C-alpha cells in the first residue's frame, strides 16, 4: 500500500488536453468539516466524450462528481477550494443560479431513486419544474427519453402506473431517462450499474455508448471491465488525489503510474 | 434440518392423500419455532402475551357493555303484568339487583320494573322480586306509547269521548299517528321555512334601523337621508308583518285541526287522560308484535335517535344536533390543525437551521401536548372569546351589541381551542414523517434542478403525507373525546339552532353547539332521573364511539390510499 506521502504528482496524459474541455476542474480541494476528502484535483472533462472515474472505495469519486453539480451544497459543513469551470463560468461563482446549473447537468445515482409518481410524471419532472406544462411537449419528451433509455417498449402501455412497480433495472433506466429528459449537456453517473444484473448492466452500457457524441458523460464505476468497455478516458483516484488520467486503452494496457497498474490489475483496492 | 428433503417427503405424502404427513409437517413447524424460543426466555413471552390478552379482553368487555346496553335501550321490550300485594305492576322489566325486602327485611334478588305513566300518578320505577317474573302475564292488548311530552305511556288507547270510550284497534291507531306526523311535518315546514326566513329578515331590518341611527349620530349621513331610509325600512317591515300574520294564521289553523283529533289514554290504575293524537310519536303493542316488527321498531327508533332533536330536557328524542355538532367541530378543527401543524413542522425540519433554538422549540411543542385540556379551555375562553371575539364584535357587529356575536362561546372558538390542543401531535408526527423521507429522493429532485420549495412541495410533502395522516388520526381521536375545554368555549346543553342553516351566510361559526361528549355527561349526571336517562347515556356513548371509529376509518382509508400511491404496490 502507498501512503499519501509516497504518492507521485498526478499524471495527465496529453490526450486529456487534445480537445476543448466542457468542464475543467482546477486545483480543487474539498473538506467535510475538518477532514479533507479531495486534494488539488486538476482534470479537464472533454466535451462529448465518456470519462470514467475509477479508484478504491472512499477515494472521493462520488465527492468529486457531486461537486460538479454542487449537490454537496446539501451537506452541512462542506468547504471547497479551487474551482470547477463549466464553459466560461465557474460553477462556484457567488451569484450563480444553482438550479439552472443543475438543469444543464443530469445525474444518475448508485441506488435508483424514482419519485413516488407515475412513470410519465417521473420523466416530466425536470420539465415541469422549469415551467413546461404543454401536453404535446411533455408527451414527446417522455417518448424520446424513454426510447433513449431503452425502456419505451417495456413501459409504453403503463405510463400512468406507479414507477415504484418497475423492476430494479427498469427503475434505474427510468432514472437515466429522467436525467436526460431535460436535455442536459452533461450526464453524471455514480455507479449506475452496481445494483443491477448483467443483462440490465449490458443495456445501460449500450445506452451510454449510444450517448457518445451527444452528451458529455462522467461515470463512476468499480468494474474495470465496464470502464474499459464504455469510456474514452479514464481517471484513477486514490486517497482523495487524482493519480493518473488518460485514454482508457492506454491506462488499461500500459499505465504510467505503478499505482494505476496495480489497481487495474487487481493487486490492491 | 433438511427443508428440501422434507418438502419432497410432504409432496409425496400429499400426492397419496396421506393425512398424517400433513400433521407431521405442522408438528415440525411448531417444534422448530419452540426450539428457537427455548433459548430466549419463555416466561417473558408468556407475560407479554398475557398483557396483550388482558388488554384485548378489557376492550372487548368495554365494547360489549356499551353496545349491549345501547341495543337494549332502543329495543322494544315486552310489557309484563305482575300481581303484587293487591297491586298490579305493569311495565318493562329492567335490570336485576340484590335488595332488602321492606316487610320481611330479607335479602333477595329483585327486578326493577319501568312503569312509565309519569302523569298518571304512578311511580315510574318499582321493584318486584325476581321470582315473580317467571309467572308474569304479557297481555297482548297493552300499548306502549311514545309521547311528545310526559314520557312513555303504558296502557290502553281509547276513543276520545269518555262516556262511550272503547278501545281503538291497531290499524286506526297507526292511521291516527301517521296522519298526525304528516300534519306535524307540514307545520314544521312552515315554521322552519318561510316563517323562520321572515323572522330573520325582520331582525335584519331592526339592525339596519339601528345602524342608520348610529350613522346619523356620528353625522355620516344627513337627517333627510336617514328619514328616507327609515321610511323604506318601515315599508319593508309592514310588508313582512303582513306575511307574518298570514303565516301565523295558517299555522294556527293547522294547530286547531290537530287539537281536534283526540284519543284517550287509559292507564292500568284506571286514570285516563285525553290528548291530541299528535302527541303520540310512536305506538305499538309490545306483546303482540313478532320479531320482524320488533326489528323494524328497533331500527325506526335507532333512526329517530340519530336524526331527531332531543326532547324533555334531552332525556328523550334524538341526538342529531349533538351528533352534528361533534362532527362539524371535529372537521373544522381538522381544517385548522392540518395546515398550521404541517407548516410549523416543515419550517422546523426543512427550513430553519437546526440548532439550539429549534431544539428548544421542539421540546416546548412536545410539552404542549402534555398540558391538561382544561388549561386550553381557560385560554380559549379568555383569548378567543373575550379578546378576539369581542374585538370582532366591536368592529363588525356593533349593531347587535350588547348581545355578543363572536364575543362568546361558539363552534369556531371551540374548534380553534381544540386545534391548539392537538397541534403538537400533528407537528411531532409530521416532523417524524419528514425525517423519514429518504435523502436519495431529495437528491434526485435537486439533481433535476428543482428549487428547495419545488422539492418540498412535489416530493417531500407527498411522501410524508401518510405520516401526517397518522398524526391527524391521533389528533382527531383526541379531539372527539375532549369535553373539558369545550365546556368553556361554546358547548351548550341545548342549542337553539345548528351552526349550518339556509340563512345567509349559511355557516354560522359563531353559534354555540351541542356535543356528544357533553351530552353524555349532561344526561348521566344532570338529568331528572339517572335511571331514566341511563339508556340514553349508553346509546349516546355508542354513537360517540361509532363517530370516532368512523372518522378514524376514513382517515386510515385515505392514508392507505396515499401509501399505495407513494410507496408502490404491496409495500405496507
Ligand atoms: N457526508 C459526508 N460527511 C463526511 N464525510 C464524508 C461524507 N461523504 C463522504 N465522506 C468521506 O469522504 C471520503 C470520500 O467519499 P466518497 O463517497 O466520495 O467515496 P467514493 O470514492 O465514492 O467511494 P465508493 O466507491 O465507496 O462510493 C470518504 O472518506 C468518506 O468517508
Ligand atoms: Mg461513491
Image: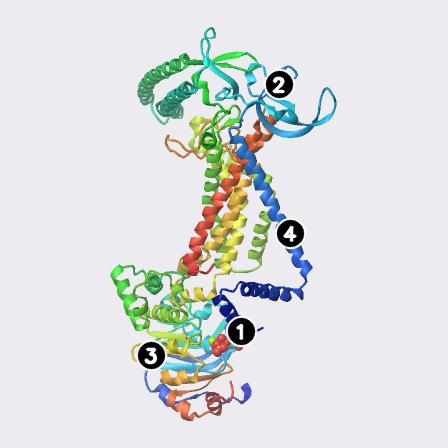
Q: Chain of mark 1?
A: B
Residue B76 locus on image (x, y percent) = 51, 28
Query: Which residue in the structure is indicated by mark 3?
Result: A206
Precedes in sequence: disc 2 or disc 1: 1
Of marks 4 and 3, the one in the foreground: 4
Q: Could you tell me which secondary element the residue under label 2 belongs to?
A: strand
Task: Decide which of B504, B491 is in the foreground and name it.
Answer: B491
Residue A261 locus on image (x, y percent) = 46, 91
Task: Decide which of B490, B195 is in the foreground and name it.
Answer: B195
Query: Which residue in the structure is indicated by mark 2?
Result: B83
Query: Which residue in the structure is indicated by mark 4?
Result: B51
Task: Decide which of A43, B229 is in the foreground and name it.
Answer: A43
Mark 3 to mark 2 CA distance (whole Å): 100 Å
Q: Quadrant of the N terminus of chain A?
A: bottom right
Residue B487 position (above or below residue A54): above
Query: Which residue in the structure is indicated by mark 1?
Result: B5
Q: Could you tell me which secondary element the residue under label 3 belongs to?
A: helix
Precedes in sequence: disc 2 or disc 4: 4
Amino acid at each position: 500500500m502507498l501512503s499519501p506521502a509516497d504518492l507521485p504528482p498526478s499524471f495527465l496524459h496529453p490526450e486529456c488536453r487534445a480537445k476543448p474541455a466542457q468542464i475543467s476542474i482546477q486545483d480543487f480541494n474539498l473538506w467535510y468539516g475538518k477532514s479533507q476528502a479531495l486534494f488539488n484535483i486538476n482534470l479537464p472533462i472533454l466535451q462529448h466524450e465518456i470519462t470514467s472515474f475509477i479508484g478504491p472505495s472512499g477515494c472521493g469519486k462520488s465527492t468529486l462528481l457531486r461537486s460538479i453539480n454542487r449537490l454537496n451544497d446539501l451537506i452541512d459543513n462542506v468547504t471547497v477550494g479551487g474551482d470547477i469551470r463549466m464553459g466560461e463560468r465557474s460553477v462556484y461563482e457567488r451569484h450563480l443560479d444553482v438550479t439552472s446549473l443543475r438543469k444543464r447537468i443530469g445525474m444518475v445515482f448508485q441506488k435508483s431513486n424514482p419519485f413516488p409518481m407515475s412513470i410519465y410524471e417521473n420523466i416530466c419532472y425536470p420539465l415541469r419544474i422549469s415551467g413546461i406544462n404543454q401536453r404535446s411537449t411533455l408527451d414527446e419528451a417522455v417518448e424520446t427519453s424513454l426510447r433513449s433509455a431503452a425502456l419505451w417498449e417495456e413501459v409504453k402501455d403503463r405510463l400512468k402506473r406507479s414507477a415504484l412497480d418497475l423492476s430494479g433495472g427498469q427503475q434505474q433506466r427510468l432514472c437515466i431517462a429522467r436525467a436526460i429528459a431535460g436535455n442536459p449537456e452533461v450526464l453524471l453517473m455514480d455507479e449506475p450499474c452496481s445494483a443491477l444484473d448483467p443483462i440490465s448492466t449490458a443495456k445501460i452500457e449500450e445506452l451510454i455508448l449510444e450517448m457518445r457524441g451527444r452528451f458529455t458523460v462522467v461515470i463512476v464505476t468499480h468494474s474495470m471491465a465496464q470502464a474499459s468497455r464504455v469510456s474514452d478516458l479514464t481517471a484513477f483516484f486514490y486517497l482523495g488525489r487524482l493519480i493518473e488520467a488518460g485514454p482508457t486503452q492506454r491506462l488499461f494496457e500500459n499505465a504510467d503510474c505503478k499505482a494505476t497498474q496495480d489497481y487495474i490489475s487487481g493487486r490492491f483496492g | 434440518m433438511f427443508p428440501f428433503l422434507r418438502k419432497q417427503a410432504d409432496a409425496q405424502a400429499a400426492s397419496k392423500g396421506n393425512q398424517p404427513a400433513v400433521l407431521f409437517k405442522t408438528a415440525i413447524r411448531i417444534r422448530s419455532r419452540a426450539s428457537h424460543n427455548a433459548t430466549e426466555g419463555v416466561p417473558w413471552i408468556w407475560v407479554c402475551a398475557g398483557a396483550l390478552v388482558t388488554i384485548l379482553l378489557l376492550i372487548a368487555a368495554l365494547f360489549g357493555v356499551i353496545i349491549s346496553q345501547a341495543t337494549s335501550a332502543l329495543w322494544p321490550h315486552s310489557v309484563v303484568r305482575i300481581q303484587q300485594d293487591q297491586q298490579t305492576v305493569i311495565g318493562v322489566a329492567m335490570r336485576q339487583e340484590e335488595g332488602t325486602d321492606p316487610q320481611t327485611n330479607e335479602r333477595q334478588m329483585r327486578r326493577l320494573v319501568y312503569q312509565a305513566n309519569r302523569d298518571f300518578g304512578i311511580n315510574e320505577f318499582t321493584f318486584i322480586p325476581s321470582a315473580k317474573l317467571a309467572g308474569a302475564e304479557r297481555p297482548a292488548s297493552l300499548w306502549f306509547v311514545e309521547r311528545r311530552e310526559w314520557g312513555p305511556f303504558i296502557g290502553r288507547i281509547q276513543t276520545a269521548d269518555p262516556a262511550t270510550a272503547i278501545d281503538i284497534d291497531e290499524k286506526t291507531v297507526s292511521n291516527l299517528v301517521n296522519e298526525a306526523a304528516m300534519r306535524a311535518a307540514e307545520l314544521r315546514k312552515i315554521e322552519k321555512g318561510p316563517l323562520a326566513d321572515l323572522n330573520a329578515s325582520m331582525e335584519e331590518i331592526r339592525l339596519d334601523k339601528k345602524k342608520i341611527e348610529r350613522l346619523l349620530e356620528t353625522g355620516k349621513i344627513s337627517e333627510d337621508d336617514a328619514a328616507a331610509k327609515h321610511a323604506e325600512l318601515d315599508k319593508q317591515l309592514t310588508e313582512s308583518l303582513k306575511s307574518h300574520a298570514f303565516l301565523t294564521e295558517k299555522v294556527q289553523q293547522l294547530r286547531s285541526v290537530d287539537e281536534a283529533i283526540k284519543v284517550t289514554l287509559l292507564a292500568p290504575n284506571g286514570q285516563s287522560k285525553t290528548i291530541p293524537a299528535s302527541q303520540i310519536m310512536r305506538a305499538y303493542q309490545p306483546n303482540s308484535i313478532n320479531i320482524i316488527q320488533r326489528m323494524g321498531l328497533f331500527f325506526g327508533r335507532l333512526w329517530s335517535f340519530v336524526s331527531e332533536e332531543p326532547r324533555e330536557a334531552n332525556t328523550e328524542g334524538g341526538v342529531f344536533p349533538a351528533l352534528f355538532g361533534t362532527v362539524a367541530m371535529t372537521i373544522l378543527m381538522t381544517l385548522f390543525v392540518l395546515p398550521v401543524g404541517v407548516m410549523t413542522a416543515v419550517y422546523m425540519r426543512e427550513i430553519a437551521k437546526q440548532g439550539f433554538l429549534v431544539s428548544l422549540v421542539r421540546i416546548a411543542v412536545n410539552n404542549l401536548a402534555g398540558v391538561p385540556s382544561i388549561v386550553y379551555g381557560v385560554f380559549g375562553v379568555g383569548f378567543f372569546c373575550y379578546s378576539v371575539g369581542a374585538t370582532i364584535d366591536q368592529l363588525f357587529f356593533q349593531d347587535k351589541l350588547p348581545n355578543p356575536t363572536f364575543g362568546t362561546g361558539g363552534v369556531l372558538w371551540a374548534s380553534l381551542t381544540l386545534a391548539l390542543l392537538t397541534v403538537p401531535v400533528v407537528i411531532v408526527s409530521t416532523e417524524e414523517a419528514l425525517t423519514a423521507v429518504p435523502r436519495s429522493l431529495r437528491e434526485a429532485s435537486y439533481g433535476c434542478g428543482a428549487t428547495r420549495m419545488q422539492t418540498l412541495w412535489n416530493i417531500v410533502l407527498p411522501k410524508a403525507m401518510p405520516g401526517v395522516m397518522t398524526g391527524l388520526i391521533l389528533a382527531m381521536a383526541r379531539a372527539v373525546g375532549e369535553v373539558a375545554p369545550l365546556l368553556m368555549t361554546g358547548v351548550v346543553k341545548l342549542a337553539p339552532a345548528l351552526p349550518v342553516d339556509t340563512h345567509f351566510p349559511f355557516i354560522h361559526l359563531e353559534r354555540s353547539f351541542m356535543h356528544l361528549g357533553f351530552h353524555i355527561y349532561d344526561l348521566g349526571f344532570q338529568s331528572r332521573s339517572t335511571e331514566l336517562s341511563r339508556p340514553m347515556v349508553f346509546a349516546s356513548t355508542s354513537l360517540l364511539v361509532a363517530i370516532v371509529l368512523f372518522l378514524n376509518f376514513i382517515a386510515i382509508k385515505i392514508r392507505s390510499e396515499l401509501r399505495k400511491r407513494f410507496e408502490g404496490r404491496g409495500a405496507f
